[in-house]
Amino acid sequence: MSGNFSFSFSGDDIEDEGELNSAAPNASESVQPQPSASAFPVAGKPLLPATSHDLHHMLAQLPSKVAYGILDIDLDGSGDIQLARRELWDVRVQLMAEDNGGETEPGLGNHDVKTGVYEGGFKSWESSVDLVKVLSPSKDFLADETVIPTIIELGCGTALPSLALFQWSLSRRTPQKNSTLSIVLADYNPTVLQLVTLPNFILCWALHQRRELPLLEDAFSEGELDLTPDVIGAFEEFLSAQKISLSFFSGAWSTEFIDLVSSRKIPTTGNGAKQHTIILGAETIYSPFALGSFTQTIFSFMKQEREQGNAAEALVGAKKLYFGVGGSLDDFVARARELGANVEELREEAEGVRRGVVRCSLP
């Protein structure tokens, strides 16, 4: 497999009118389970190290405004959800203004993936929408007073599944009663977290709260949001008041990555609530290398939670086969069952490029 490649399906991104592309991954490549192995077939190329990113510092690095569009997702006849996403062209404009490559920036050109450099996170992929649809019926767990909900999205990119859970939580949670909602967002590329993941969460919050806060109403113009110091400060204050924690991690999946994510401060509660962790992954198994490291990573997290007496499950959305690179959902299911997991098939899409969503848990 060459150092960069493009899947020969039509389209760059999920269109705002709801048409989905048939391209490949929104994921982080990484090491295989063996510590000495490289997930990237690029001889001598180092992997990005596991890194934690401070939210306050990330907020300070945002541009003065962002442009956005709305993705309308039909929840299989049970309503719909509108998710705000930063426009790709706006990312290009920022990069050109900062003289960081502009149109030649990996992920904003002609390649879906540039192996070991960029792993697809600037674009939204169709399996992430499938995950949103699967999550919708159980969204009320976000307001369950007996649960400490933790969401870990691996290879998050534009983070549509986590973004949907965040948006649903805004109208369901009562901070006086509910435990902290912890959302962990991880992508191979730190630039993806900074340029699209975090802005999408701010946009989601601002659109939801604009009628409650006059400063937000004033910050909106046609398709744009001004990220003034007051807006950023209000976002931080809201997260604190609502007991919502956003954590950001970049780098290759590895033992170091698992340890770093696991070492984050986990909120505690005195009301007897139990932690419930949901691990999300959309288009994260598009090659045998990614499949192996992703499986190892989610099993490590689930085993840690089981040892601590907590509930954990993984929801994985992917195509049935990634042509030309060798990954497949069936291979993941077989690998997970070999490792002793219970695997339940939750959703299958037969039209277009076949894909599905499965749930994994440990007995």
Image (cartoon, rainbow, N blue to C red):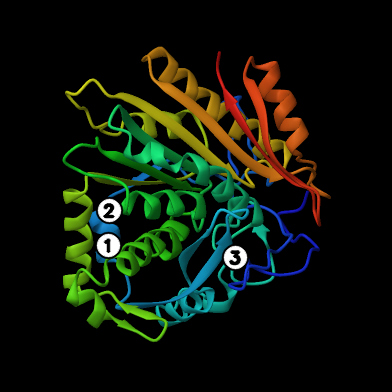
Type of the residue with mark 2:
Leu
Given contact means CB atoms under 8 Å apart, are the residues at marks 1 and 2 in contact?
Answer: yes
Q: Quick one: label 3, few (<14), some, or many (20+) residues within 10 Å? A: many
**Badge 2 density bin: few <14, some 14–19, many ≥20, Cα 10 Å:** some
Left or right of residue 133: residue 110: right
Q: Which residue is mark 1?
A: 59
* Spot occupied by residue 340 in the image (x, y as percentages of width and height): 64, 14
Q: Can see residue 287?
A: yes
- In-front residue for pair 301/205: 205
User: Element type at marker 1?
Assistant: helix
Q: First in sequence: mark 3 or mark 2?
A: 2
Q: Secondary structure at mark 2?
A: helix
Q: For the residue marked with disc 3, what is the amino acid?
A: Gly
Q: Which one is in front in this view, the residue at disc 3 or the one at disc 1? A: 1
Describe residue 220's horizontal placement relative to residue 237 as left or right: right
Question: Quadrant of the rendered structure where residue 305 is?
Answer: top left
The C terminus - image quarter: top right
